[in-house]
Amino acid sequence: MTTHMITGAGSGIGNLIAERLATRGDRLVLVVRDAARADDLAHAFPGSVTMVADLTRPGVLADAVQDADGIPDRIDSVIHAAGIVELGRVGDLPVSAWESQLAVNLTAPAELTRLLLPRVRAARGQVVFVNSGAGLTAHPQWAAYAASKHGLKALADALRGEEAEHGVRVTSVYPGRTATPMQAEVHAQEGADYDPDRWIDPASVVTAVLTALDLPRDAVISDLTVRPGPR
C-alpha cells in the first residue's frame, strides 16, 4: 500500500490532498497540532495514522516521530503543505513574526524531512514541498513569509541533489494566490475584500501535486508553478 505523510491536512490544499489520496485507497499519516485535531482527522480519514506535533516548535518533532504509533518503515511521499503567513513591513514586523514563519514554513519541513529520510529512501519515495509564488518573488510587506519560502526552495534544491543517489525524488510546487482559508486571512491582513472566485481553485493545485507524485519513475517534476488562469 502506498503511504503518504501530510502536514497541513486540516484545511486548504493539504486537506484536499488527503481527500484525494484517501479516495484512491492510499494510506495517510497526518501531522496535526494537538490531540483534539488528531481525533477530528482520524474520524475524517478512517484508517489514517496521526502524529501530534507543534510545527512552531521544530525541536519537538524528533520526539513526536518516536512517540507516534503506526508510522510504517516505508513512506512513499512526504508532502509539506502546512504554512502560516503574517504580513508586514520590515520596519514594523516583530521578531516573533519572523520566528514563527521560519519555524513552520522552513525549519519544521527541514527537520521532519531529516527524520523521515530513512523511510523515504527505503521506498525510493518523494518529498513534495508546497511552496508559494512568494518563494520565487518577494513583494512589499511579504518579507518574512517570502524569506521562509525562498528558504524552502533552497532546501528542496539541495535535498534533490543529495538524495538522487538514494532514488528519492524532490518536487517544489509554487501556487499563486489560491482560494483557501489562508488566502482569506491574507486579504484580512491586507484590509481587502476577499472574492474566492478571483483565485485558483485549490483542487487545481492538488491536481498538480498528484501529477508530480504519479509521474513514472523515469522522470521527476522538480519545479512546478501554478498561476491563476485567464478569466
Image (spheres, helix red, strand yellow):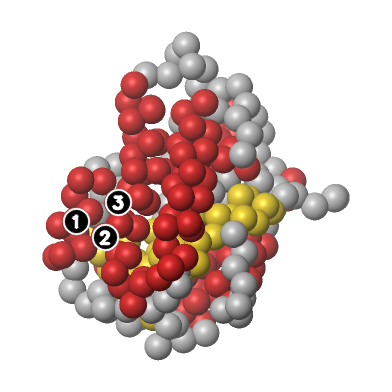
**Labels 2 & 3 near each other (Cβ < 8 A):** yes
Secondary element under disc 1, as helix, strand or loop, is helix
Contact? badges 1 and 3 (CB < 8 Å): yes
Work out whether residue 202 can be spotted.
no
* 175 up-or-down from 116: above or below: above
Q: Residue at x 57, y 79 (%)?
A: 217
Looking at the rendering, which quadrant does residue 192 occupy? top right
Q: Is residue 131 visible?
A: yes
Q: Quadrant of the N terminus?
A: bottom left
Mark 2 burial class by Cα count in 10 Å: few <14, some 14-19, many 20+: some
The crowd level at tag 3 (other Cα within 10 Å; few <14, some 14-19, many 20+) is some
Residue placed under numbered mark 3 in the picture: 111
Name the residue at 40% across, 70% down: 166
**Residue 36, image x, y percentages:** 25, 60
Image: 3 above or below 169: below
Q: Amino acid at mark 1?
A: Ala
Residue sitting nearer the eye, 30 or 213: 213
Q: Quadrant of residue 100?
A: top left
Whole-percent x, y for residue 117 in the image: 32, 65
Residue underneath mark 1: 62
Task: Mark 2 and mark 1 in contact? Answer it, CB < 8 Å.
Answer: yes
The label number, if any, that marks residue 115 in the structure image: 2
Q: Which residue type does callout 2 highlight?
A: Leu
